[in-house]
Image (cartoon, rainbow, N blue to C red):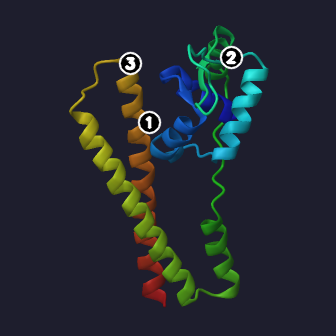
Amino acid sequence: MSLPHAILTALLEKPSSGLELTRRFDRSIGYFWSATHQQIYRELGKLEKAGLIRALDRDVPTRGQKKEYEVLPSGREELERWVGVREDPRDPRDPLLLRLRATGVVGVGGDMVDELRRHRALHQERLAEYREFERRDAARGNGTERDRVHRLVLQGGIDLELFWVTWLDRALADLEDTG
């Protein structure tokens, strides 16, 4: 149920069209909550039908123009309600971990070691990307609550990528020593 809340959050940050939301998901929100173009448009329709958002009025005819959405008071109330919900941490469901466990039964081959190296490189790339965001955002400072919260979310992403890089280094060292 988090996609509608991710969209409400994004629209409260800045009223946007479906296309703009898709781009924003690709550039920021999508790093921790991904959604396809189709999912976003489908959810916009549901949110509008539920009376949580509305299309902004245009002074000119809208034919061929993007529909821009804003959050209604009921949408803000729903987001506030959702933020206060208690949720237990979720167990990780990463196919790589399951596949690695399976190698304990079928044997560790070069393909798995190569896959671990590939994953390490991908996590290292993402970490570098997050570090670049961190450098870029440092110039803005932490003046507002939004800035501080964005910094905390980014730090969570950095810490997760550091975990993966460190763990994959350990796994590769262990498997290469026994291989």
Q: Position of residue 157 (x, y in %)?
A: 44, 45
Q: Tell me which residue sits at (66%, 56%) in the image.
A: 93
Outermost residue, left side: 139
- Which of the two discs, 3 and 1, labels the residue nearer the N terminus? 3
Q: Between residues 22 and 94, which one lies in front from this camera angle?
A: 22
Q: Which residue is mark 2?
A: 78
Name the element at disc 2: helix
Q: Tell me which residue sits at (38%, 18%) in the image.
A: 145
Asked if marks 1 and 2 touch (Cβ < 8 Å), the reply is: no
102 sits left or right of 144 in the view:
right
Q: Is residue 74 above or below residue 38?
A: above
Query: Type of residue at label 3?
Result: Glu
Query: Type of residue at label 1?
Result: Val
Q: Is residue 143 above or below residue 153?
A: above
Name the element at disc 1: helix
Estimate the spatial distance between the alpha carbons at disc 1 and disc 2, rounded to whole Å.
21 Å
Say which mark, if any, is on residue 145. 3
Asked if marks 2 and 3 touch (Cβ < 8 Å), the reply is: no
Estimate the spatial distance between the alpha carbons at disc 2 and disc 3, rounded to whole Å.
20 Å
- The N terminus lies in quadrant: top right
104 sits left or right of 133 in the view:
right
Outermost residue, top side: 73
Say which mark, if any, is on residue 153. 1
Front: mark 1 or 2: 2
Q: Is residue 123 above or below residue 171?
A: above
